[in-house]
Amino acid sequence: MHHATDTVDVLASDERIRTEFVEANGLRFEVDICGDGDTLALCLHGFPELA
């Protein structure tokens, strides 16, 4: 059985993925980036109770 922490551990050890921060409209977003080129996969999540 896989747990959410398993995924986090894999991502943390994958050197192809880098983390950057982007500021927009007064908010700071953490962005994980992997690869380059014209293809984009955008995955968003949020917590409405914190909005």
Image (spheres, grey):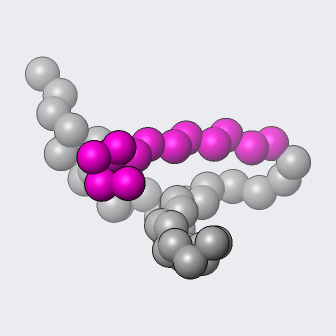
Give the residue drawn at x 67%, y 40%: 41
Residue 10 seen: no
Quarter occupied by the C terminus: bottom left
Q: Which quadrant would residue 35 be assigned to in this image?
A: bottom right
Query: Residue 15 in the image: x percent, y percent?
Result: 48, 64
Main SS, magenta residues = loop
Q: Is residue 29 above or below residue 26?
A: above
Q: Is residue 15 left or right of residue 12?
A: right
Give the residue drawn at x 74%, y 44%: 40
Q: Is residue 36 left or right of residue 10?
A: right
Residue 41 seen: yes
Give the residue at the far top of this rendering. 1
The span picked out in magenta is 39-51
Query: Residue 21 in the image: x percent, y percent?
Result: 54, 75
Q: Is residue 46 magenta?
A: yes
Q: Is residue 27 left or right of residue 45?
A: right
Q: Is residue 40 magenta?
A: yes
Query: Residue 23 in the image: x percent, y percent?
Result: 60, 76
Q: Is residue 30 above or below residue 50?
A: below
